[in-house]
Image: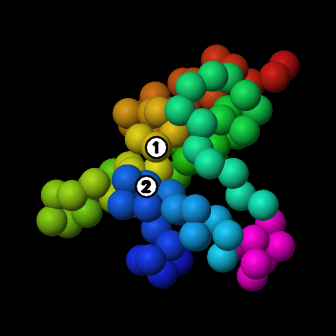
Amino acid sequence: MPKKKYQNPKGGLNAAGRKYYKRTEGSNLKRPLKTGTSGRRVSFAARFGGMARPMKKKNGEPSRLALALKAWGFSSKEAARNFARRNKKK
């Protein structure tokens, strides 16, 4: 898990986190897409919609999974799965 300073409190990584990831791993991560049907958003929805992790922490706060889904414009894992099914390429 990334350090707190690289995490966006609303889900995902902040700009510094994406820059750190590029420097250490060599990959160029992009910002989340809240709308549209681009391949990136469909791929995210398919991956994260199938995760078995809980949507809430034990103290009732949203988990990082829930925050990431919200950052990408999804209200739940089910919503992400349905979006991915509707928009996957045939």
Q: Which mark is residue 11?
A: 2
Q: Residue drawn at (58%, 62%), measured in percent from left and top? A: 15
Q: Distance of mark 2 from mark 1, alpha carbons?
A: 6 Å
Q: Is disc 2 in contact with disc 1, using a CB cutoff of under 8 Å?
A: yes
Measured from the top left, where is residue 75 in percent x and y? 38, 33
60 lies left or right of 75: left
Q: Look at the picture and state if 16 lies above or below 30.
A: below
Q: Secondary structure at mark 1?
A: helix
Between 80 and 4, the residue placed more toward the observer is: 4
Measured from the top left, where is residue 90 in percent x and y? 84, 19
Magenta stretch, residue numbers: 21-27
Q: Residue drawn at (28%, 54%), measured in percent from left and top? A: 62
Q: Residue furthest left?
A: 59
Residue 16: quadrant of the picture: bottom right
Q: Residue drawn at (81%, 22%), measured in percent from left and top? A: 89
Q: Secondary structure at mark 2?
A: loop
- Give yes or no for residue 23 being in the magenta stretch: yes
Magenta segment main secondary structure = helix
Q: Earlier in the sequence, mark 2 or mark 1?
A: 2
Q: What's the residue type where badge 2 is placed?
A: Gly
Q: Which residue is mark 1?
A: 71
13 lies left or right of 25: left
Between 82 and 75, the residue placed more toward the observer is: 75
- Give yes or no for residue 38 being in the magenta stretch: no
Q: Look at the picture and state if 5 lies above or below 8.
A: below
Determine if residue 85 is in view: no
Residue 60: quadrant of the picture: bottom left
Between 8 and 56, the residue placed more toward the observer is: 8
> Local crowd at mark 1 within 10 Å, few (<14), some, or many (≥20)?
some
